[in-house]
Image (spheres, grey):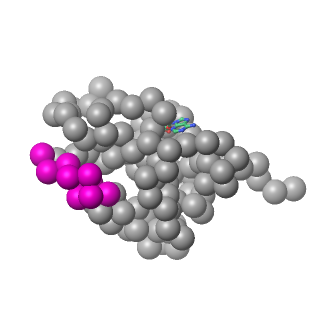
């Protein structure tokens, strides 16, 4: 039996609606349904990597592509004052969807350290 699709695989396959900002053959970018900043996007690989803690050397190109894409989108959205990329990993990291994704947050000053 095949593994059930994750929420983000269902969004990628247009089985669940989302607001797409960008898409290519490796990843897609959607608006977070519960935004924590004026700009809150999710950069998501189409091929499921559960989380950074389970990534392998074979994932290196995909992980690099997510960051390059985040930078490109941030430039396009003119987040010239800065932005933050976040990857939550596991329960203590605040991960709720077990399909790796990069949060792109911007449009307001962001506090440090995070909660
Ligand atoms: P994380 O908690 O790091 O796993 O991030 C999961 C993110 O997915 C959260 O910020 C949620 O608000 C977001 N999210 C959950 N369901 C949806 C959805 N249907 N469309 C867009 N974003 C979602």
Residue 59 part of the magenta segment: no
26 horizontally vs 110: left or right: right
Q: What x and y, as percent, mark residue 111?
A: 19, 30
Q: How many marks?
A: 0
Q: State the residue lying farthest toward the top.
A: 115
Task: Report the residue at 25% width, 41% height from top.
Answer: 106
- Determine the residue positioned at 49% across, 67% down: 24
Pinpoint residue 10: horizontal percent, then vertical percent: 67, 48
Tell me which segment is drawn in magenta. Answer: 73-81
Residue 32 sits in which quadrant? top left
Q: Position of residue 5 (x, y in %)?
A: 71, 49
Q: Position of residue 56 (x, y in %)?
A: 51, 66
> Where the N terminus falls, by quadrant?
bottom right
Q: Is residue 75 visible?
A: yes
Q: From where the camera sits, is residue 53 visible? A: no
Q: Quadrant of the C terminus?
A: top left
Identified at 61% across, 54% down, the residue is 12
Give the camera-side residue of 79 and 102: 79
Relative vertical location of residue 66 with respect to residue 61 in this rendering, above or below: above
């Amino acid at each position: 039996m095949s593994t059930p699709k994750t929420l983000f695989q269902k969004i990628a396959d247009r089985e669940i609606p989302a607001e797409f900002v960008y898409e290519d053959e490796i990843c897609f970018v959607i608006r977070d349904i519960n935004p924590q900043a004026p700009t809150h996007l999710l950069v998501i690989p189409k091929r499921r990597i559960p989380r950074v803690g389970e990534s392998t050397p074979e994932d290196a190109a995909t992980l690099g592509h997510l960051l390059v894409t985040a930078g490109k989108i941030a430039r396009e959205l003119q987040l010239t004052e800065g932005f933050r990329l976040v990857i939550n990993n596991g329960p203590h990291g605040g991960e709720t969807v077990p399909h790796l994704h990069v949060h792109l947050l911007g449009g307001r000053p962001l506090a440090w350290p995070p909660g």
